[in-house]
Image (tube, helix red, strand yellow):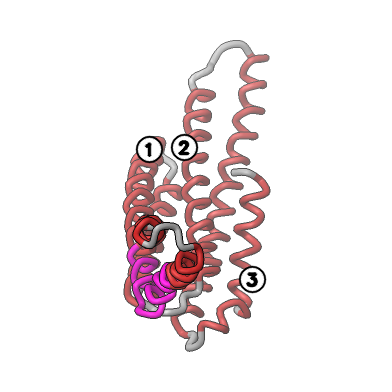
Amino acid sequence: MVAAILSIILLVLFYWWFRGDWVLAAAYAGIAVLATLSVPVLYRLAGFTLADEVQWLAGREEKDHREMLARLKTVEGQLDNLGIEEGVGQAKTLTAILDDYHSVVETRFLGKKHSPMAYLSTARRVQKQAIQNLTDAVAVGHSLASIGRHDESAQLQERMQGLNSDQRGRLDALLAENRELFGALTDTAVEVANISSYSDYERLDTMARLVSLAEIANRTGK
């Protein structure tokens, strides 16, 4: 953009200096266009574009990592207060998964010319879905606590028992889904750690499983 603006200014000065000579101005304009277009080409060939992309990816990864850990820590405390022990255990497991993922990204992928973006972005989507499931489990836990405080008429108690059963089923489903997500994340991470060629990432069976889970999560809007 800066190069284009400078080229336009110089073109106007050139036209004014030669008192409106259209032939010379046209020739100069052609040179200016080539010079302007050469800037991004040289920028990329010199490796500055890759450096910018790596810096952006590193910044985004660090920001996402901090935000997800903070959110997960809050959710873990809420699950603990509600007495949802498996949820607390899953929060600790997911914290370890996030730390491992962050280390892999920093040590193996950042700074490399080619990175398995499909794996990186899909793993993040699945991790965020797992956190959302735990957040939903907190909401269900509060609902169960509220139901447990009702001890009025027999008719109301029967209704509350039905709600209690529904909410416990919802909680079990959320925790079961997370177990599946954790398994897919772990299995894929192990294969990724052992793979030697970036071109092989898309052909991983575990990668296909991870992508499938991420797409299901998006469709359900959880």
Closer to us: 186 or 128: 128
Label 1 with label 2: CB-CB less than 8 Å: yes
Q: As shown in the figure, which amino acid type bears the numbered disc 3?
A: Ala
Q: Quadrant of the C terminus?
A: top right
Q: Secondary structure at mark 3?
A: helix
**Numbered badge on residue 138:** 2
Bounds of the magenta segment: 35-55
Identity of the residue drawn at 48% across and 20% down: 149
> Residue 101's spot in the image, x, y percent?
40, 67
Q: Would residue 19 be visible to someone looking at this image?
A: yes
How many angstroms separate mark 1 from mark 2 (CA)?
A: 7 Å
100 above or below 132?
A: below
Residue 39 lies in the magenta-colored region: yes
Q: Nearer the viewer, mark 1 or mark 3?
A: 3
> Residue 83's spot in the image, x, y percent?
40, 39
**Numbered badge on residue 78:** 1
Q: Secondary structure at mark 1?
A: helix
How many angstroms separate mark 3 from mark 2 (CA)?
A: 30 Å
**Numbered badge on residue 208:** 3
What predominant SS class does the magenta segment belong to? helix
Label 1 with label 3: CB-CB less than 8 Å: no
User: Residue farthest to the bottom?
Assistant: 196
> Residue 96's spot in the image, x, y percent?
36, 62
Q: Earlier in the sequence, mark 1 or mark 2?
A: 1
